[in-house]
Image (cartoon, rainbow, N blue to C red):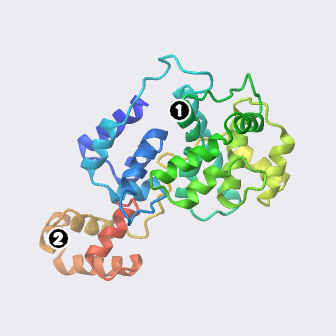
Amino acid sequence: MAESRDRLLELLDQGAGSTGSLAAVVESDVALTLAVLRRANRDALGSVGGVPRAVAKLEPAELESIARKVGSFALFTGSWPPGLSPERIGFHALQTRQAGVQVGAAVSYGSEDELRTAALLHDVGKVVLADLGFECPDAHTAPRPQERVARERREIGTDHAAVGARALEQCGIPQVVTHAVAGHHAPSAQGLAAIVRLADMLAHYQQGGPVETGQIFSAALALGLGRDALRQVIYSLTYPLPAGASGVEPCPLSSRELEVVRGLSEGKVYKQIALELGISVSTVRNHLHRAYGKLDTADRAQAVLVAAESGWL
């Protein structure tokens, strides 16, 4: 969306964006999410499945280049094939992400960043198929999601989930995400794929889609969620995600320890940091040693790297 692109560029131009705030804007859009992850995974040392880590890995100039090059559209404009308007795909992706976060919390899933990515990108195969000239079934020709998948398999021998997973693999996205995208319509889905499957159903249900409640209950039971737990998840979907939520862990450092580490990240020496904060050089050292212990790092370079990758700077 043009709005997401413009907000990202504004933060970068002002130099005011923390890793967390930049990641939140990137995650508001499917195309930005995929473009940033693709760039972060372009080398052999990639395997970055979450947007916060990807943003921390890239330089601001790289993020700006991505934002300026990626195609964008203005809301409620253009003529699109049925079911393939960017608005509908984008809004459904965001609703699936929100549902996925709630389901993941209910089942204590470990990596929220990868969960959010898989949920956001779960339908990217529909765009790929459309680009190849295949018109995906819409809610009018095949009302239920499983009917649409079955029709795709009959007509082209595969479905948008498998196609999307293959496209993500070619972009270097980690297997845990691609496997979840590939299996998010399979009744036998497990792990992350099962979470995305239930989240997708709940998003369709929220949008008034003809999703059978029996299928929703079955998908929840596959994750160990009973009816009461599922009701709690659905109830929680009436509230938006917390502002700025982007998978960034709470910072273990005190405000002063974080200020000292931030000073190091800006290339300042101990004396400069001490003058700016109105403390002694020995106090700066004490703050840093405590920060090293909390971050489980051995030196300033490691401390800055951990803090940046975690979105605390």
Q: Where's residue 225, x and y in %? A: 79, 57
- CA neighbours of label 1 inside 10 A, class few (<14), some (14 to 19), many (20+): few
Identify which amino acid the numbered label 1 is placed on.
Answer: Leu
Q: Horizontal and vertical percent for residue 263?
A: 22, 65
Q: Earlier in the sequence, mark 1 or mark 2?
A: 1
Foreground: 96 or 312? 96
Q: Residue at x 51, y 53 (%)?
A: 169
Q: Quadrant of the C terminus?
A: bottom left
Q: Amino acid at mark 2?
A: Ala
The tag on residue 57 is none
Residue 74 falls left or right of residue 177: left
Which residue was labeled with disc 1? Answer: 132
Residue in view at x 38 percent, y 65 percent: 44
Residue 50 makes an appearance in the image: yes
Return the residue at label 2. 274
Answer with the quarter of the image where residue 25 lies: top left
Q: Is residue 280 left or right of residue 252?
A: left
Q: Identify the element where label 2 is drawn.
A: helix
The residue shown at (58%, 21%) is 81
**Where does the image place residue 9, in percent across and percent down from the top left?**
30, 38
Residue 98 visible, this angle: no
